[in-house]
């Protein structure tokens, strides 16, 4: 962009913003790795005219689909962690787009600068 090649302050601010976004992205990815992935499914079983509900966390590990039982006491906690994971994934996508945009701006400014000095 023309502004980046003319004004070193703006270029410096863009590089600082790029660094900040990359640090935020790294932090979000680190937090994301600690959260469970997948979705909760409920299984209902009938036994002697009573219906019992069992909850499972289903997620993929490569080609396999793994179903892990969740005790009733932990269901709410797992649901909160899964919703937090979705929120973090959405933030990660927005930071990745922002980083790509900043890289594009900075590269365009560098290409023009190098192209004019030949």
Image (cartoon, helix red, strand yellow):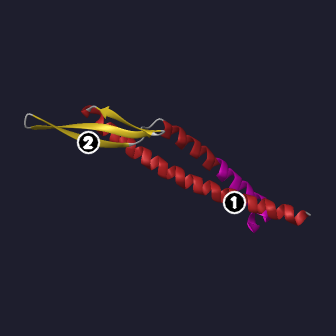
Q: Residue furthest front?
A: 63
Left or right: where 51 falls relative to 76: left
Separation of residues labelled 1 and 2 (CA atoms):
46 Å
Left or right: where 114 falls relative to 44: right
Does 52 lie within the magenta span?
Answer: no
The x, y position of residue 11, in whole percent, is 74, 58
Q: Residue furthest right?
A: 118
Task: Report how many numbered discs are placed on residues in the image.
Answer: 2
Residue 6, by quadrant, is bottom right
The x, y position of residue 13, in whole percent, is 70, 55
Asked whether the beta carbons under mark 1 and mark 2 sit within 8 Å of each other, the answer is no
Secondary structure mostly taken by the magenta-highlighted segment of the chain: helix
- The residue that mark 2 highlights is 42
**Image quadrant where one finds the N terminus:** bottom right
State the SS at label 2: strand
Q: Is residue 41 positioned above or below 68 on the image?
A: below
Dot 1 alpha-carbon crowd within 10 angstroms: few under 14, some 14 to 19, many 20 or more: few
- The residue that mark 1 highlights is 104
Q: Residue furthest left?
A: 49
The x, y position of residue 38, in whole percent, is 40, 42
Dot 2 alpha-carbon crowd within 10 angstroms: few under 14, some 14 to 19, many 20 or more: few
Give the label, 1 or 2, closer to the camera.
2
Q: Which mark is residue 35?
A: none
The x, y position of residue 102, in whole percent, is 66, 57
Q: Which residues are magenta?
A: 1-19
The residue nearer to you, when weighing 95 against 13, is 95
State the SS at label 1: helix
Residue at 25% x, 34% y is: 72
Labels 1 and 2: the sequence-earlier one: 2
């Amino acid at each position: 962009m023309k502004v980046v090649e003319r004004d070193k302050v703006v270029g410096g601010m863009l590089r600082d913003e790029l660094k900040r976004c990359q640090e935020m992205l790294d932090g979000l990815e680190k937090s994301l790795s600690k959260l469970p992935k997948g979705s909760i499914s409920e299984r209902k079983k009938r036994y002697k005219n009573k219906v019992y509900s069992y909850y499972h966390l289903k997620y993929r590990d490569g080609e396999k689909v793994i179903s892990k039982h969740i005790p009733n006491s932990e269901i709410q906690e797992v649901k909160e962690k899964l919703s937090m994971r979705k929120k973090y994934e959405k933030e990660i996508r927005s930071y990745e787009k922002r980083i790509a945009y900043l890289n594009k701006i900075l590269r365009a400014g560098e290409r023009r600068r190098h192209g004019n000095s030949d």
